[in-house]
């Protein structure tokens, strides 16, 4: 009997998690343009998850030219808008288009950023 009660409560809690949100792991893939000065050598860059609303840097990962990495975001049922910014060791900076992330099951948890564009 206790086993069935636990199963029933778990079934009720799962839809609530996707509706309420929380920590979520996403995968982002893309590329940073190669440096002409460093031809043949991939520089290390820091890929930052940045809030599009506040500009706050929320998370960072070390990446190289072609990348595919995971990041943790806090998400809720309403989409939150983020930009990914890569700051490279040679002083170059690149950014992605704005990405919307939501905890709703209909939203993707995998994001293909493509070639990041040079930041101003």
Image (spheres, grey):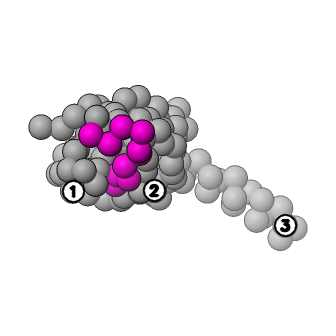
- Image quarter hosting the N terminus: bottom right
Residue found at x 83% / y 61%: 4
**Does residue 46 appear anywhere in the picture?**
yes
Label 3: how many Cα within 10 Å (few below 14, some 14–19, many 20+): few
Q: Quick check: is 30 in the magenta stretch? A: no
Find residue 10 and report its image quarter.
bottom right
Q: Earlier in the sequence, mark 2 or mark 3?
A: 3
Q: Nearer the viewer, residue 64 or 81?
A: 64
Residue underneath mark 3: 3
In the image, is 80 to the left or to the right of 25?
A: left
Which residues, given as a range, are shown in magenta?
37-48
Q: Earlier in the sequence, mark 1 or mark 3?
A: 3
Horizontally, residue 16 falls left or right of residue 40, namely: right
| 1 or 3: mark nearer the eye | 1
Disc 2 to disc 1, C-alpha distance? 15 Å
Q: Are marks 1 and 3 in contact (CB under 8 Å)?
A: no
Answer whether residue 20 is visible to the viewer in this image. no
Residue 38 within the magenta-colored segment of the rendering: yes
Query: Quadrant of residue 37 in the image?
Result: top left
Q: Which mark is residue 72?
A: 2
The residue tagged 1 is 56
- SS type, badge 2: strand
The one of 99 and 106 positioned closer to us in this rendering: 99
The foreground one among 37 and 9 is 37
């Amino acid at each position: 009997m206790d086993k069935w009660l636990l199963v029933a409560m778990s079934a009720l809690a799962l839809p609530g998690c996707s509706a309420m949100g929380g920590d979520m792991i996403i995968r982002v893939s893309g590329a940073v343009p190669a440096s002409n000065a460093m031809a043949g050598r991939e520089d290390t860059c820091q890929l930052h998850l940045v809030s599009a609303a506040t500009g706050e840097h929320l998370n960072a990962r070390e990446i190289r030219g072609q990348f595919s990495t995971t990041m943790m975001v806090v998400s809720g049922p309403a989409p939150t808008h983020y930009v990914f910014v890569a700051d490279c060791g040679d002083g170059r900076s690149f950014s992605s288009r704005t990405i919307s992330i939501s905890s709703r099951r209909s939203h993707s948890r995998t994001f293909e950023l493509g070639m990041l564009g040079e930041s101003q």
